[in-house]
Image: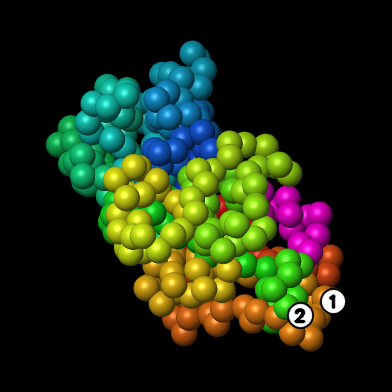
């Protein structure tokens, strides 16, 4: 294969892998604690099947993709390529191994976005496919595929939840008005905030915020499950609390506490993402200052909602190329 043909193949692979990512993102609520995965089957330059992992305990993306292939197209599987955003599993869990299914279907080539960090997979699926004589390409849009499942990856690699720090501030950088709560969010940003709650496993506030404001911490302005509510107290060190959450299978955590709670997480290096809402019309003369962003942050994106903006920050070099679209 010459250089131009190679580049053409890679571009085509990226097109279909992006479709895998679009499909996978539909599992943001139902797939957890499993990762979000999308799969696309291509033959003769045409998609003949696609699917994603809809719900934990049910069919994986590959299973659903093969199930969607029409009867008249099944004869094309022997010359097809299946694209999968995450390495096919090689172990028996709630469902049989997807690597075995791919082998049994007789596809010609498999394109994988990224390796699964889960101990029972970690390259075993790819090895099984190659041992069966199937051509396997790994690492197409790898960073984007890893980013989609950053909660799952962080949980398994760092043995703690993926931690999102979140606060709202006035135009001049205050989070309250002389100790009194402020209405900083608007209707649109409130919906986005509750969407985030529906997508994460747990939400935490400090005991002062909890007893002073009595926040409901539920999903009232969006559809989805309420996150587990956690009130931070001083009876256990912060790292031990994160260890407890890991042991209980909590993969992601929103921290919506006051400045002291937020700074405790920042000071302990316990954060992966920071979301800051700013109301650009609202100012106060005195109150509690918003926390300082850590030095190692990188702006991932910023979205405008009327007079308010929502800025998302991540650790430098952690995320794929910044985008104007809102991150999952």
Residue 37, percent from left and from top: 44, 40
The x and y percentages for residue 201 are 48, 45
- Give the image's coloring scheme: rainbow
Between residue 167 and residue 82, name the one nearer to us.
167
Pointers 2 and 1 in contact (CB under 8 A)?
A: yes
- Number of labelled discs? 2
Q: Helix, strand or loop at disc 2? A: loop
Q: Quadrant of residue 276?
A: bottom right
The quarter in which the N terminus is drawn is bottom left
Q: Is 188 included in the stretch rendered in magenta?
A: yes
Let me know if residue 313 appears in the view. no
Asked if 241 appears above or below 90 in the picture, the reply is below
Task: Give, as a single range, the part of the protein colored magenta.
Answer: 183-195
Q: Nearer the viewer, residue 312 or 147?
A: 312
Q: Residue at x 53, y 80 (%)?
A: 293
Residue 297, percent across and down? 49, 78
- At horizontal 33% and vertical 60% (from top left) the residue drawn is 236
Q: Is 165 positioned to the left or the right of 132 in the image?
A: right
Work out whether 52 lies above or below 322. Answer: above
The majority secondary structure of the magenta stretch comes to helix
Check disc 1: other Cα within 10 Å, few if <14, some if 14-19, many if 20+. few
Q: Earlier in the sequence, mark 2 or mark 1?
A: 2
Please give the name of the residue rendered at 52% of the width and 46% of the height, measured from the top-left corner: 229
- Indicate which disc residue 281 carries: 1
């Amino acid at each position: 294969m010459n250089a131009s043909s190679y580049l053409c193949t890679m571009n085509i692979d990226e097109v279909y892998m992006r479709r895998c990512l679009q499909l996978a993102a539909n599992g943001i609520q139902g797939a957890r604690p499993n990762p979000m995965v999308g799969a696309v089957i291509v033959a003769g330059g045409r998609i003949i099947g696609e699917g994603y992992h809809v719900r934990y305990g049910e069919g994986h993306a590959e299973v659903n993709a093969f199930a969607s292939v029409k009867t008249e197209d099944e004869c094309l599987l022997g010359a097809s390529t299946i694209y999968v955003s995450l390495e096919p599993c090689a172990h028996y869990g709630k469902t049989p191994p997807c690597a075995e299914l791919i082998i049994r279907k007789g596809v010609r080539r498999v394109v994988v976005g990224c390796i699964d960090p889960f101990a029972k997979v970690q390259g075993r699926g790819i090895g099984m496919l190659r041992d069966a004589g199937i051509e396997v390409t790994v690492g197409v849009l790898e960073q984007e595929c890893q980013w989609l499942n950053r909660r799952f990856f962080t949980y398994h690699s760092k043995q703690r939840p993926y931690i999102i720090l979140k606060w709202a501030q006035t135009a001049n950088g205050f989070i309250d008005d002389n100790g009194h709560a402020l209405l900083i969010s608007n209707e649109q940003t409130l919906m986005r905030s509750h969407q985030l709650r529906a997508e994460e496993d747990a939400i935490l506030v400090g005991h002062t915020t909890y007893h002073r404001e009595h926040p409901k911490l539920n999903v009232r302005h969006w559809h989805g499950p309420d996150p587990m509510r956690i009130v931070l107290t001083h009876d256990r060190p912060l790292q031990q609390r994160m260890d407890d959450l890991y042991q209980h299978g909590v993969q992601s955590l929103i921290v919506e506490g006051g400045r002291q709670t937020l700074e405790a997480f920042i000071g302990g290096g316990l954060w992966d993402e920071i979301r800051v809402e700013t109301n650009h019309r609202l100012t106060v003369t005195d109150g509690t200052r918003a926390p300082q962003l850590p030095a190692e942050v990188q702006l991932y994106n910023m979205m405008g909602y009327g007079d308010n903006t929502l800025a998302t920050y991540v650790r430098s070099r952690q995320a794929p190329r910044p985008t104007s679209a809102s991150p999952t």
